[in-house]
Amino acid sequence: MTDITPKATSKTSKADSLSSRLWQGFLTTVGTERFFHIFSPWVKWLGALAAILLGVGTVWGLGFAPIDYLQGNSYRIIFIHVPAASLAMSVYLALAVLGVIFLVWKIKTASLVAQAIAPIGFCFCVLSLLTGAIWAKPTWGTYWVWDARLTSMLILAFLYAGVMALFSAFEHSANRGKAAAVLSIVGAVNLPIIKYSVDWWNTLHQGATFTLTSAPKMSASMWVPLLIMMIGTYCLVAALAIYRTNTLILSREHNKAWVQRLLGK
């Protein structure tokens, strides 16, 4: 009878060693210095791509997309409202993920990225609420109703405000970022409520424009520019996130040698 235990143990140790090396390699790429040098060149390319996509999407959506047979031209605010609402939710989901990374693995860069993107998400959340109110007036006859979708989006805005306040309150504390990370994670329970509120409750708000399981609920001449606007907005947010994170890195680590060398150039 052959004993396979030594071979199994050897394979396990090799797998552990490989995973350990991969993890250590990953940690070297998420350090503040490496993050700065890796992602800095991306800002101009993402910004340029965002400008092109948003320009094309805006002209197409506002100037050439057909008039809706029910809502007329008032529906065109969808080209701003939908990307803003999507980004507001996506950025908060990113905050929750970054909060877990920061609390579990103590990766400082995760907290810096979270601090950088929180105001961006807040601005898009407010923009979503404002454009939604403007769109609601001709559609529902009022700027605001305590609808499940609208109320949960308003709560998301308050959650963003709370996260930003905690980052500011603990700016010079050893616990900087921890309280904001906890609120980001806890507040993420609001995201599925926003997403599925139109399915769970009787609501005035329309369903999702895009889904993975069904065709778009509008003609291609409408949803294509909307998709272009969404992609352009995501590129814009990515560029802003990198730029703001790198600014925080330089501000926090201005006394370190690599920053001094960079500024010296």
Image (tube, helix red, strand yellow):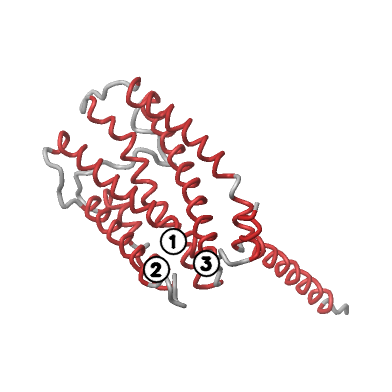
Question: Residue 121 location, x and y as percent?
Answer: 37, 52
Check disc 3 and report the residue beneath it: 101
Question: Residue 20 location, x and y as percent?
Answer: 71, 70
Question: Residue 200 location, x and y as percent?
Answer: 26, 53
Kindly report the distance in space between the C-alpha atoms of the residues bearing marks 1 and 3.
14 Å
* Number of dots carrying numbers: 3
Check disc 1 and report the residue beneath it: 115
Q: Is residue 72 above or below residue 177?
A: above
Q: Amino acid at mark 2?
A: Ala
- Image quadrant where one finds the N terminus: bottom right
Q: Secondary structure under badge 3?
A: helix
Circle nearer the N terminus (2, 3): 3
Check disc 2 and report the residue beneath it: 180
Q: Is residue 253 left or right of residue 265?
A: left
- Which mark, by number, is residue 246? none
Asked whether the beta carbons under mark 1 and mark 2 sit within 8 Å of each other, the answer is yes
Foreground mark, 2 or 3, reads 2
Dot 3, how many residues are within 10 Å of its Cα: few (below 14), some (14-19), or many (20+)? Answer: some
Kindly report the distance in space between the C-alpha atoms of the residues bearing marks 2 and 3.
13 Å
Q: Work out which residue is located at the far front of the displayed protein and give it.
A: 264
Q: Amino acid at mark 1?
A: Gln
Asked whether the beta carbons under mark 2 and mark 3 sit within 8 Å of each other, the answer is no
In depth, the one of 133 and 198 nearer the eye is 133
Q: Is residue 111 left or right of residue 64?
A: right
Q: Is residue 154 left or right of residue 6?
A: left
In depth, the one of 92 and 3 nearer the eye is 92
Circle nearer the N terminus (1, 2): 1
